[in-house]
Amino acid sequence: AVVVLRLGHRPGRDDRMTTHVALTARALGADRAVLVGDASQAGATVTDITDRFGGPFDVTVTDAYRPLLRDWEGTVVHLTMYGEPVESVTPAIRERHRTEPLLLIVGAGKVDFEVYDRADWNVGVTNQPHSEVAALAVFLDRLFEGRELDREWADADRRVIPQETGKRVEELDE
Ligand code: SAM
């Protein structure tokens, strides 16, 4: 399993970004997102999308990330511009992920040093500053080697039929 832990949600300012972190996690193969802080609006949006477009995907909003970090039995990867290059370390992370669940941490503002310290890998998607959504997308695609792009969604009530032009959505029976 891959669980995405989103740290440092600033209410108002980060609502869209936190929503996009969780939607990207869902669309690109993670199993669960844990949103830390007052992120109930983002949580509700993602639950609604999962209800309509399918799952499985779980989203949890919590006040404290330290218990999860402390008790996590598996690999911890932290995405940061200060980390080691994604292209060098992902093969080793993928190998470890064959047998262990993966906690994948992204920040918003400044991330506490204890996260850098606790991580098995601090990973940079380039060492340039950009976005947690972009970093998450590139990392998941590298981890899954593109297989996440082709998957079945369970319990969806609608499905988009790809079109060269225009929009086509099929309503599915329960
Ligand atoms: N200035 C903040 C700091 O020093 O921690 C980072 C803010 S950045 C807008 C928000 C998050 O995006 C970071 O916590 C990290 O997870 C992710 N991020 C930004 N650039 C990244 C990069 N080049 N590689 C990996 N993750 C990145």
Image (tube, rainbow, N blue to C red):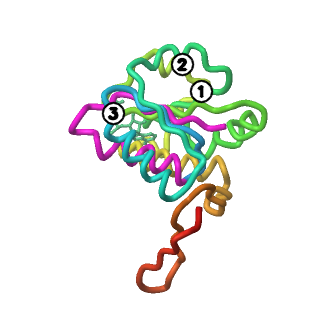
Q: Can the viewer see residue 82?
A: no
Q: Are marks 2 and 1 in contact (CB under 8 Å)?
A: yes
How far apart are the two marked residues, 3 and 2, measured between alpha carbons? 19 Å
The correct choice, above or below, for 18 with respect to 118 in the image is below
Query: Who comes first in sequence, dot 1 or dot 3?
Result: 3
Q: Does 12 lie within the magenta span?
A: yes
Circle nearer the viewer, 3 or 2: 3
On residue 76, the disc is: 1
On residue 101, the disc is: none
Residue 50 picture location, percent across and down:
49, 51
Circle nearer the viewer, 1 or 3: 3
Q: Residue beneath label 2, please?
A: 69
The correct choice, above or below, for 161 with respect to 84 in the image is below
- Taking the view exactly as shown, the residue that stands out farthest to the front is 174
In-image side of 29 versus 132 (left or right): right
The kind of residue tagged 1 is Val
Local secondary structure at mark 2:
helix
Local secondary structure at mark 3:
loop
Q: Residue at x 49, y 22 (%)?
A: 116
Neighbor class of circle 2 (other Cα within 10 Å; few <14, some 14-19, many 20+) is some
Q: Depth check: 136 or 47 in front?
A: 47
On residue 39, the disc is: 3
- Taking the view exactly as shown, the residue that stands out farthest to the right is 99
- Taking the view exactly as shown, the residue that stands out farthest to the bottom is 165
Q: Are marks 1 and 3 in contact (CB under 8 Å)?
A: no
Residues shaded magenta: 1-27
Q: Residue at x 74, y 33 (%)?
A: 96
The kind of residue tagged 2 is Leu
Position of the N terminus, as image quadrant, is top right
Q: Does 146 lie within the magenta span?
A: no
Query: Who comes first in sequence, dot 2 or dot 1?
Result: 2
